[in-house]
Image (cartoon, rainbow, N blue to C red):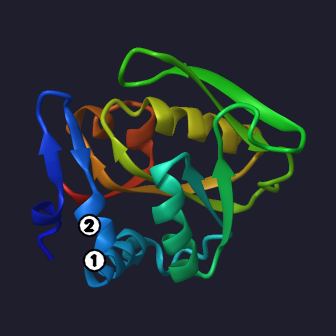
Amino acid sequence: MDYKKYIREMKTKNRCDLTLLLANFKVLDNLIKDMARPFLHSKIDKVVALEAMGFIFGTGVARELKAGLCLIRKPNKIAWSTESIDFTDYTKQRKCFEIAKSAILPNEKVLIVDDWSETASQLKAAIFLVEQAKGIIVGISCVNIDDQAKNDKIISKYKLNSVINY
């Protein structure tokens, strides 16, 4: 399916809008299946979804894979003890991600899901949190992973699934 025709681009902000993609059930359903397909036989225990758009895709992928869902959140959103990591995102802003302690158990097989990765900074933060919890990362699935992120020495070690190449 040609997902690109459901993505609007605002070049002045270097951003893409997924509203049309999300609004069309058939397109969204196919996209979720395409995000999950390479991992159907990997026996994933948990899908780790990154705030915020990753929550949408991660929920669908977890359902497809019959796996649990773990959310990586912005600071102070989790009402439990957390592990955290600070990082610099693609806009050069300092950010922080948190994960609830015990959300991932040692040796659980994990798939990381997000919408878009330009620089891999958020994915690398998620990798750190999953590995700190002793989870085993099976792969990463995104709507799009830019070449800069795909070529990053840390994330390129994992099985990467980019549904579109934007």
Amino acid on which disc 1 is placed = Asn
Establish if 166 lies above or below 92. below
The answer to which quarter of the image holds residue 75 is: top right
Q: Is residue 118 left or right of residue 61?
A: left
Per the image, label 2 sits on a secondary structure element best described as helix
Establish if 53 lies above or below 61. above
Q: Is residue 102 left or right of residue 137?
A: right
User: Which residue is found at the position 49% from the left and 72% from the top?
Assistant: 61
* Count of marks overlaid on the render: 2
Q: Label 2: how many residues lie within 10 Å, few (<14), some (14-19) or many (20+)?
A: some
User: Which residue is found at the position 58% from the left and 40% from the top?
Assistant: 127
Expressed as whole percent of the image width and height from the top left, the position of residue 147 reads 21, 38
Per the image, label 1 sits on a secondary structure element best described as loop
Which mark identifies residue 24? 1
User: Which residue is found at the position 55% from the left and 46% from the top?
Assistant: 51
Question: Could you tell me if the residues under marks 2 and 1 are in contact, i.e. CB atoms within 8 Å?
Answer: yes
Expressed as whole percent of the image width and height from the top left, the position of residue 159 reads 41, 55
Q: Is residue 14 left or right of residue 151?
A: left
C-alpha distance separating marks 2 and 1: 6 Å
Q: Is residue 164 left or right of residue 102?
A: left
Amino acid on which disc 2 is placed = Leu
Residue at mark 2:
21
Expressed as whole percent of the image width and height from the top left, the position of residue 6 reads 16, 64
Front residue of 139/92: it is 92
Tell me the quarter of the image containing the N terminus: bottom left
Front residue of 96/127: it is 96
User: Which residue is found at the position 43% from the left and 39% from the top?
Assistant: 155
Expressed as whole percent of the image width and height from the top left, the position of residue 162 reads 29, 57
Establish if 164 lies above or below 29. above
- Is residue 152 at least partly visible in the picture? yes
- Is residue 113 at least partly visible in the picture? no
